[in-house]
Every structure is written in C-alpha cells, then in structure tokens.
Amino acid sequence: MPWIRRLIYIPLTILLMSSVPVQAQDMPASLQAGLGLLGGFPSGGFGNNITNPGIGISGHIGYRFPQSPVILGLDMSYMIYGHESRNERFSTTIPDVSVRVVTDNNIFMTNLFLRLQPREGPFRPYIDGRFGFHYLFTKTSIRDIPDPFSDDIASSINFSDVAFTYGGSVGFMIEVYDGRSERTQFNRSVRTVSIDFRLRYLDGAEASYLNRGDVLRQSGQTALNISRSDTNIITVFVGASVEL
C-alpha cells in the first residue's frame, strides 16, 4: 500500500524535525513503556485470505537517549484473527463428561524499533521504523465448559510458521500527567503518563498459515487447509505510555 508508506515516512518526519528543540537543555536518558489494545487488518494477499479483523494486546519498552529525540526499543504484540469453539464428549469411553474444544488462529509480532519523538509538550507526535518477525500459529485446546477461561486441559499447535517483517508507525501521545517537578534524587517516580494512539504498517514476507475453519475433521482424522501469501498487516493501537 503506497499510501501507507507515504503516510508513515514523509509528512510526520517534517513535523518531528521542526519540533526538536534546538536550545541546550538538561535532558537525561529515560525509559518509555506502554501497553494497550490492538486492532489488526490484514492487507494484500494476507487480506484476501483473512477477511476479518483481529484483536489483541501490545506492549513496548524503549530507551530514550540523553539530549536526543531518539528512542530505541522492543515492541511485542499478540493478536487473534480467527476463533471457533464447539462442545464434545471427553472421549468415547467417558461420554458423560463434556468439554469445550477451542481453536484460535494467532499472530505473535515482535519488532525492534527506532523512534523519533519530541521530549517535551502535552502533544508529542512520533514516527518510527521497525523490523522483526511474525509468528503465525493455530492452536486447539480443551477447556472445562462451566469455566471457558480456565487453564487448558490439553492443547496442541496444529500449524505454525515464521515471517520476517519491516515497516513503520506514526502516532501521537497526549500527556495526562506530569510528575517531573516531583522527581528528586530520592524520588524516582513516573515522569509523565500519556494516552498513546498509533497506526502501524508491517510488510511481512511470505508464510503459510491457517484461517478460521481450516482445521478439518474427517473420519476421525485431521486435515489442514493451508494458505500461503505475504503477511502484510495494518494495526491500530490505543493505550497508555509512561516515561520513567
């Protein structure tokens, strides 16, 4: 998607460069960490096969260099893009016990990122470049019917694959708490708390994966309907970020 790449790499770069303070200030190194909800929208060949959006969680931690708008960090996300469940008898020899069989199609995304973001101000836009990998896997598990969120009784990975990725993000943070004036040598409390909004595009290499309903059961045997394509994905993130 060329428009996504232009959106990420051109206009916000100009904005960030114009917002970097030029005057000398005491700007020590700090840590930035965040956590929030993630919505995913497969794109390209991946989107042709996976037509429904995914949902999950995402978190990051980054090191902000002193006297600099640069942050180097690690971002990790987990998303489910397919889900199905059914009730079955526990076994042919125990027909009086029923369990729930759940199959989830998942993506675990890990990326190193390099971010440019102003250090000061209630509104801080940012842009970053990133590279990493997608781990795509489909898992089937057995759970108790009365408590669907209990630990799995048994589980199995039906299929998995890995794809390398690269891309970038644009976003902005709105500061809701500033505790820098309260920090002392003996009080190392949170510097700032911000609401974080982010749009991310990842260009993923080809990989094989399963969609919802692709684990087939035939005459007591399992068959897999495997798809293969690029693994491009657009994600939208809404969460909270803190500077430490």
Image (cartoon, helix red, strand yellow):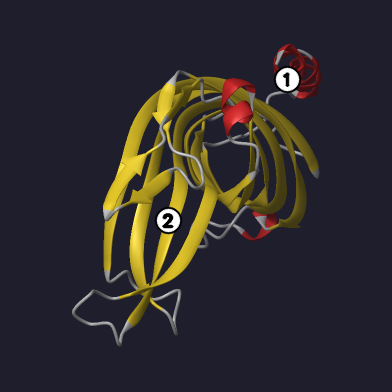
Mark 2, secondary structure of its residue: strand
Quadrant hosting residue 2:
top right
Q: What percent of the width, then of the height, locates residue 43?
A: 64, 26
> Which residue type carries mark 1?
Ile
Quadrant hosting residue 202:
top right
Q: Is residue 221 above or below residue 41?
A: below
Q: Residue at x 76, y 12 (%)?
A: 10
Residue 178 placement, left or right of 91: right
Residue 182 placement, left or right of 29: right
| Residue 243 visible to the viewer | no
Q: What percent of the width, then of the height, locates residue 201?
A: 63, 26
Q: Is residue 23 above or below residue 34?
A: above
- Tag 2 and tag 1, C-beta contact below 8 Å: no
| Residue 109 visible to the viewer | yes
Residue 28 placement, left or right of 192: left
Q: What percent of the width, then of the height, locates residue 42?
A: 62, 32
Q: Is residue 244 above or below residue 236?
A: below
Q: Which mark is residue 103?
A: 2
Q: Nearer the viewer, residue 44 or 211?
A: 211
Q: CA distance from mark 2 to mark 1?
A: 32 Å
Q: Is residue 72 above or below residue 154?
A: above
Mark 1, secondary structure of its residue: helix
Closer to the camera: disc 2 or disc 1?
2
Q: Which mark is residue 4?
A: 1
Q: What percent of the width, then of the height, locates residue 153?
A: 27, 71
Q: Nearer the viewer, residue 180 or 107?
A: 107
> Which residue type carries mark 2?
Thr
Quadrant containing the N terminus in the rendered view: top right
